[in-house]
Image (cartoon, rainbow, N blue to C red):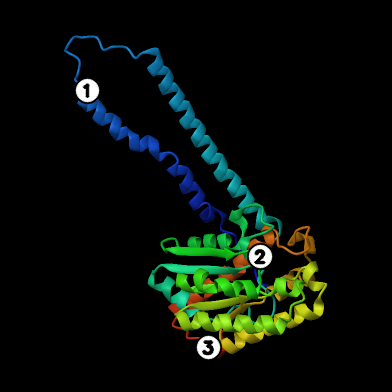
């Protein structure tokens, strides 16, 4: 089994802590203004007694100080709450890499090269409710936000934007209608396209879905230099109760990735391993609706995606050039 991946809680807290500190800055920024006002006020004549502050002025100052202390206290409490929530996710159950076989999505040369060069990076997370984050306890815990946090920890000086273009209930037919505006026109460096689950649930033909996805990938590739990673359906009770359609959808999306030389994250196999090889109860990563992931499921999914991006950056730095025909993830 692969070694446990540390969560890096201290670094993860950098952004929330900075936000808390920013809440204190108005006090500091107002200080020069007060000093200027004091300089503009004529000094009292020598020997004269300064006028005492009025009760109303004293009350206002005390109230302002109390409000600021309350604001600071609430900001610190928020940071502590975020820290506890983040730390609890992987302290209860570790997020482990898949066992056996290749466990990377392969080379992601465009986004990796941008990160190596220190250029701004735009990632579009395209999909349905799994991308939107249905089932997460907070937007902070959906997978695009978790992925963004991980990449910003790893590359603290990089300008990284992760756009959540997930809309619940959609699949390939609906996504193709907004592909141009919400993906291609954004000029992304990486597109993570989660697709196929709702097609399985609706009993749509997996072959039709795969054809639309292939057409969409072709359009993305023709529009510019963007890496593409497909994400297949989740392993959850609502999906596995349709085993034939689910299996065919997984295979066909893998075939599209192979034909178009793009990456694929085999979410179905990764989640099945959580249950069958790591002995995790399904309810430990899927919410009560039997379909959507919970905070831990999204967090581990994002962690593994982020690890693959970071690994690809390392390959670029080492001068490793992965041939296009082996860039796809090879399922376990």
Q: Quadrant of residue 106 in the image?
A: bottom right
| C-alpha gap between disc 2 and disc 3 | 28 Å
Q: Quadrant of residue 24?
A: top left
Quarter where residue 175 is shown: bottom right
Residue 17: where, in percent of width, then height?
49, 47
| Location of residue 75 in the rendering, given as x and y in whole percent from the top left corner | 52, 40
For label 1, the residue is 41
Residue underneath mark 3: 324
Find numbered disc 2 in the image and state the secondary structure of the residue it sits on: helix
Disc 1 on helix, strand or loop? loop
| Image position of 304 with respect to 43: above or below | below
Q: Is residue 72 above or below residue 162?
A: above
Q: Residue 47: in sight, yes or no? A: yes
Which of the two discs, 1 and 3, labels the residue nearer the N terminus?
A: 1
Q: Position of residue 193 (x, y in %)?
A: 59, 73
Mark nearest the camera among 1 and 3 is: 1
Residue topped by disc 2: 130
x, y percentage for residue 215?
58, 83
**Badge 3 element:** helix
The quadrant the N terminus occupies is bottom right
Left/right of residue 85 with respect to residue 21 in the rendered view: right
Q: Is residue 189 visible?
A: no
Dots 1, 2 in contact, CB < 8 A? no
């Amino acid at each position: 089994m692969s070694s446990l991946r540390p969560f890096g809680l201290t670094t993860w807290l950098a952004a929330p802590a900075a936000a808390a500190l920013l809440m204190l800055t108005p006090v500091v920024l107002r200080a020069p203004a007060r000093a200027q006002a004091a300089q503009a006020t004529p000094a009292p004549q020598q020997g004269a007694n300064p006028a005492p502050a009025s009760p109303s002025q004293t009350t206002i100052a005390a109230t302002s100080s109390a409000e600021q202390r309350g604001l600071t206290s609430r900001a610190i409490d928020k940071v502590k709450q975020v820290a506890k929530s983040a730390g609890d996710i992987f302290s209860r159950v570790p997020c482990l890499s898949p066992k056996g076989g290749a466990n990377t999505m392969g080379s992601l040369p465009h986004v990796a090269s941008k990160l190596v060069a220190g250029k701004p990076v735009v990632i579009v997370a395209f999909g349905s409710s799994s991308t939107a984050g249905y089932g997460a306890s907070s937007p902070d815990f959906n997978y695009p936000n978790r992925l963004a946090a991980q990449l910003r920890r790893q590359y603290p000086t990089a300008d990284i934007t992760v756009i959540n273009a997930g809309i619940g209930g959609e699949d390939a037919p609906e996504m193709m209608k907004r592909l141009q505006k919400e993906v291609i026109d954004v000029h992304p460096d990486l597109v993570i396209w989660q697709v196929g689950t709702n097609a399985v649930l609706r009993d749509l033909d997996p072959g039709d879905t795969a054809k639309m996805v292939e057409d969409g990938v072709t359009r993305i590739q023709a529009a510019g230099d963007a890496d593409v990673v497909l994400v297949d359906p989740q392993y959850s009770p609502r999906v596995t109760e349709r085993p034939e359609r689910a299996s065919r959808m997984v295979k066909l999306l893998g075939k599209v990735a192979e034909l178009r030389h793009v990456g694929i994250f085999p979410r179905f196999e990764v989640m099945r391993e959580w249950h069958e090889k790591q002995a995790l109860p399904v309810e430990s990563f899927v919410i009560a609706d039997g379909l959507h992931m919970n905070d831990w499921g999204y967090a581990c999914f994002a962690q593994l995606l982020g690890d693959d991006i970071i690994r690809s950056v390392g390959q670029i730095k080492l001068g490793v050039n992965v041939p296009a025909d082996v860039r796809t993830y090879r399922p376990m």
